[in-house]
Amino acid sequence: MNYINKLTYVSYDGFMEMDNLRNNYDSVLELDCKDITTEDKFWFYFGLYFNFPTRVDNWAAFSDWMRDLAFWDRNKSILIIFKNIDELFCRNLTLQSLAMSVFWEEVLPYWENEVIKVTSGSMQPRQFDVYCVMSQYDDF
């Protein structure tokens, strides 16, 4: 199956209109970025949800585990929702950009089609989307 995995920024109001979005995925991780003030917390929440076999303490390791997921259900479609994305890492735009670039440049393309080449066909593409929802009273 062909997927076009995406990273989408959306306003709070726009996201509220997508009430059935979650129903299109097997697995939904919803994080409130007000609670994610450090990289360690970011990696911790993902490690907890996806049950990473080892602790993550850098972006390269995070990217590796997000592209592996062989230890996780191979067929599940994944939706990650970052609520209050503008609050991520205490509004540190450099870290926010770094985190999203890991998804945009590495994780999403991998699960879209690179997984077949890397695993010689033993793993298949999966739907994997990321929605970044702005705080209720912030504009783009």
Image (spheres, helix red, strand yellow):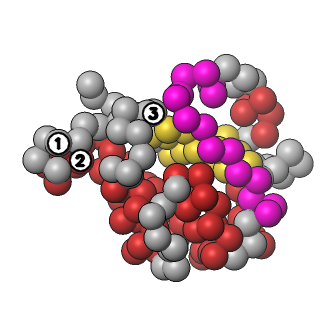
The image position of residue 103, as x and y in percent, is 45, 56
The amino acid type of the residue labelled 2 equals Val
Q: Going by the picture, which residue comes out furthest to the bottom?
A: 57
The amino acid type of the residue labelled 3 equals Ser
Q: Please name whichever residue, 70 or 6, is drawn nearer the observer in this view of the structure.
A: 70
Is residue 39 left or right of 59 when viewed as pictured? Answer: right
Badge number at residue 104: none
Residue span colored magenta? 21-35
Which residue is drawn at the image coordinates 42% and 46% (left, top)? 72
Q: Earlier in the sequence, mark 2 or mark 1?
A: 2
34 is higher (above) or lower (below) than 69: below
Which residue is drawn at the image coordinates 50% and 38% (left, top)? 78
Is residue 20 left or right of 58 when viewed as pictured? Answer: right
Q: Which residue corresponds to mark 1?
A: 122
Q: Which residue corresponds to mark 2?
A: 115
Badge number at residue 77: 3
The image position of residue 127, as x and y in percent, is 41, 34
